[in-house]
Amino acid sequence: MTVEKFNGASAIVSGGAGGLGEAAVRRLHAEGLGVVIADLAVDKGKALADELGSRASFVTTDVTSEDSIGEAIEQAHQLGQLRYAVVAHGGFGVAQRIVQRDNSPADFAAFAKTIDLYLNGTYNVARLVAASIAAAEPQADGERGALVLTASIAGYEGQIGQSAYAAAKAGVIGLTIAAARDLSSVGIRVNTIAPGTMKTPIMESVGEEAIAKFAANVPFPKRLGTPAEFADAAVFLLTNGYVNGEVMRLDGAQRFAPR
C-alpha cells in the first residue's frame, strides 16, 4: 500500500528508533516514503533501518544541534525529495513539584533540560526541516510538504509534578497554529498530535497491574492507545491537505486528574 503523494518523497522522524516514533517510521515506510530515523539510540536505530532495508536510513541525531539535524536532512534527500517530518522524540523526564515537600524549590536545571528537549528541540527540527522543504517544487494546491509535531494531553492538564513537561508540551500546542501561519507562505502545513496514555515499551515496563489502573481512567475505549494508532493519525495529518494548524487529541476522551 502506498500513498500517491508520497511517491518519490522522503520524511524525517525524530525519535524514530522506538515507541511512537518507531511506529511512525514503519507506517510511513510502508506507505512508500523514504524515511530517515533520526535518534540518539544508535543500536536500535540501525537495527530498524537494517530491518526495513531500502528507503530507510539511520542518522545519529541530537535535536538540539543544528549540525546534527542538518546531517539527517542531507540523508533524507538521498532517499527522495524531503517533504515530511514527524517530530516524536522524547527520552527525558523528571517528576518534581515547584516547591518540594521539604519546601526546597524545584531543580531549575531539570526544568530547563525538559524545555530544551521537548520544546526547543521540536522547534529546531521544525525550522530546519521546513527551510529545506520550502525549496521543493509545489504539488497540488501549492503544497510543498507537511510537519506533524507531538505534544501531550499534559500540555492541557498537567498533573502534579509535571510542571516542566506540561509547560514544554503546552509550548508545542501553542507553536502549532503560529507555525502553520508562518509556513503558509511556502506551502507547508503544520499539525500536532497530543497523545494520552500510550502503550509504548516504556509504559509496558511498569507492569500489567499499573497499566490497568491507567486504562481505568480512559472513558472509551478502556485501554491505552497504541503506537500504531499514533502512526495512523500521523499519516492522516500528513495526507489530508485541508487540515492545518490543528492539535489532535489522541486519548480516548481521557482528561488527566491532578494526580
Image (cartoon, rainbow, N blue to C red):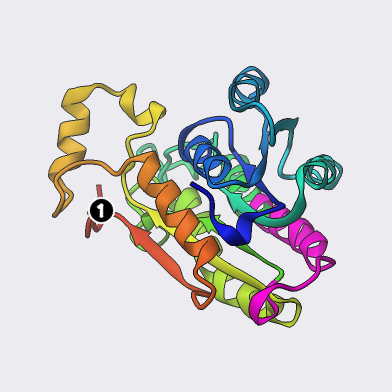
- Left or right: residue 153 versus residue 13 is left
* Residue at 65% across, 26% down: 53
Q: Position of residue 142 (x, y in %)?
A: 70, 79
- Left or right: residue 190 versus residue 99 is right
* Residue at 42% across, 56% down: 233
In this picture, is 36 found above or below 231? above
Residue 98 in sight here: no
Neighbor class of circle 1 (other Cα within 10 Å; few <14, some 14-19, many 20+) is few
Q: Give residue 52's quadrant in the image.
A: top right
Q: Position of residue 167 (x, y in %)?
A: 50, 58
Kind of residue at badge 1: Pro
Q: Position of residue 26 (x, y in %)?
A: 52, 37
In this picture, is 65 found above or below 148? above
Residue 95 in sight here: yes
From the viewer's side, name the closer residue of 215 and 83. Answer: 83
- In magenta, the rendered stretch is 121-143
| Residue of label 1 | 258
